[in-house]
Image (cartoon, rainbow, N blue to C red):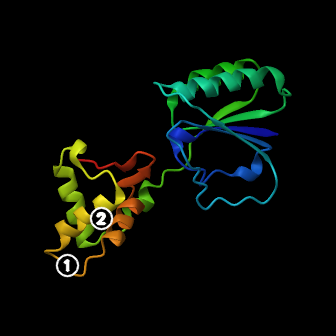
Amino acid sequence: MMWAFIDYENIGSLDGIQMGKYQRVFVFCGPKNTKLNIGQTTFSKFFKIEIIKLKTTGANNLDFHIAYYLGIYSKVADQHIEFHVISKDNGFNGLINHIKQTGRKCKKITLQSKDKAKSAIVLSSCAKLAIKRLKQIDGRKRPRKQDKLENWIDSQCRSIDDTINSKVVVNELVKTGMIAYSDTGVKYQLKK
């Protein structure tokens, strides 16, 4: 048997997690995670999923909660249950090694990066122009709401394409991972 402890705040989606191999899943969400993105994940059987929604913020707050639950369940769960910590955070490595030393199977699972797929997307000339100009703007002055971003793209690209559909351009930027939406608005992940 295997149980998953998912650092949702760190990975941002349940897409790519092989849920069917787990009997129990714990999903740890921070206060800014208002929705669970399951992506293309399909479920072929029933399993128990628990969503642990934290109300407080702070440096490594969610990580401390995962460590707490790992400690509790390490003591009370049957010894044959293997723990998988699903996160990109290397801070769990020491704890995982310690749990292994107690005799329990435990490992960190890092999901395959989708950067290769994102880089394979061919961007329109408007999307390329938008990225170029967004990189030139101080991060604090970039549009923070979707409608504001669409209006900004419309104004920037109108000179090269008068049939611009700013919603399509925004979708291109989302698919490449250049922007994402959170409960606070548009989040930029532009590399200089």
Label 1 Cα crowd, 10 Å radius (few <14 / some 14-19 / many 20+): few
Q: Position of residue 120 (x, y in %)?
A: 39, 65
Q: Is residue 122 visible?
A: no
Answer with left or right where residue 132 lies relative to residue 50.
Answer: left
Q: Is residue 23 above or below residue 37?
A: above
Instruction: Read off the residue under disc 1.
Output: 161
The mark found on residue 150 in the picture is 2
Residue 119 falls in image quadrant: bottom left
Q: Quadrant of the N terminus?
A: top right
Q: Dot 1 lies on which element?
A: loop
Q: Is residue 108 above or below residue 156?
A: above
The amino acid type of the residue labelled 1 equals Asp
Q: Earlier in the sequence, mark 2 or mark 1?
A: 2
Q: Is residue 51 visible?
A: yes
The amino acid type of the residue labelled 2 equals Glu
Identify the residue at image location x=24%, y=81%: 163
Identify the residue at image location x=42%, y=52%: 181
Q: Position of residue 118 (x, y in %)?
A: 41, 60
Q: Is residue 79 above or below residue 86?
A: above
Residue 50 falls in image quadrant: top right
Q: Position of residue 166 (x, y in %)?
A: 30, 70
